[in-house]
């Protein structure tokens, strides 16, 4: 991983490239497309935190955090809502960078815990999140496993 990694907000100049980002074919049923995620971000404008991941000038991923401290469901107060790393860019540390960026934003906002949901699937991200320190809570939401990471 290089020091040229950065996050960028989604805007008119990069939205088409963002929507063209695709994951591996076997992951398509496991994670929502970036276009779907951007629609969700629009609908949840006050709480969604969508960002593109760049390595230099190359778009390599998309991450969306969710920050809704007043949400009645604890799992939805602070978390990673979506993570897509381009099919040909996986395994290079971009996902870790994106997750760490959401965690840094959560800390900046005074949060102490970040959650994530994943689909239990052979090509799902469970092992990735567990390697980053998330732990399954034993709870399932909408058929997905809830993981949590303490920021303390």
Image (spheres, rainbow, N blue to C red):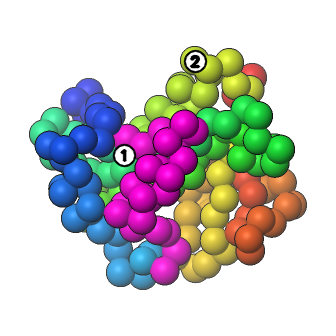
Q: CA distance from mark 2 to mark 1?
A: 21 Å
Tell whether position 99 is magenta. Answer: no
Q: Position of residue 7 (x, y in %)?
A: 32, 34
Q: Residue at x 80, y 66 (%)?
A: 140
Percent position of residue 30, x then y: 52, 74
Picture quarter with the C terminus = top right
Q: Residue at x 63, y 71 (%)?
A: 119
Q: Quadrant of the N terminus?
A: top left
**Badge 2 or badge 1: first in the primary sequence:** 1
Q: In which image quadrant can residue 24 be found?
A: bottom left
Residue visible at 74% across and 71% down? 142
Q: Is residue 31 magenta?
A: yes
Q: How many other residues sit within 10 Å of disc 2, few (<14), some (14-19) or many (≥20)?
A: few
Q: Is residue 108 above or below residue 60?
A: above
Regarding residue 40, the answer to whether it shows in the image is yes
| Magenta segment boundaries in residue numbering | 29-51
Marks counted in the figure total 2
Query: How many neighbours does mark 1 have within 10 angstroms: few (below 14), some (14-19), or many (20 or more)?
Result: many
User: What residue does disc 2 label?
Assistant: 108
Front one among 58 and 47: 47
- Location of residue 131 in the rendering, given as x and y in whole percent from the top left corner: 61, 50
Q: Residue under label 1, please give it.
A: 94
Closer to the camera in the image, 12 or 6: 12
- Decide if residue 102 is on the left or right side of residue 92: right
Residue at 29% x, 42% y is 10
* Nearer to us in this view, 136 or 75: 75
Quarter residue 144 falls in:
bottom right
Residue 127's x, y, as percent?
60, 61
- State the mark number for residue 134: none
Q: Give the answer, above or below, for where 10 lies relative to 2.
A: below
Secondary structure found at label 1: helix
């Amino acid at each position: 991983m290089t020091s040229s990694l950065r996050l960028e907000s989604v805007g008119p100049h990069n939205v088409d490239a963002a929507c063209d980002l695709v994951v591996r074919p076997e992951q398509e049923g496991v994670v929502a497309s970036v276009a779907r995620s951007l629609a969700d971000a629009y609908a949840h404008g006050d709480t969604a935190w969508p960002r593109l991941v760049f390595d230099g000038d190359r778009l390599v991923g998309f991450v969306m955090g969710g920050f809704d401290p007043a949400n009645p469901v604890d799992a939805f107060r602070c978390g990673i809502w979506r993570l897509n790393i381009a099919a040909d860019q996986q395994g290079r540390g971009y996902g870790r960078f994106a997750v760490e960026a959401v965690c840094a934003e959560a800390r900046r906002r005074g949060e102490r815990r970040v959650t994530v949901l994943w689909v239990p699937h052979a090509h799902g991200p469970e092992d990735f999140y567990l390697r980053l320190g998330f732990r399954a809570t034993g709870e399932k939401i909408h058929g997905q496993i809830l993981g949590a990471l303490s920021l303390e």
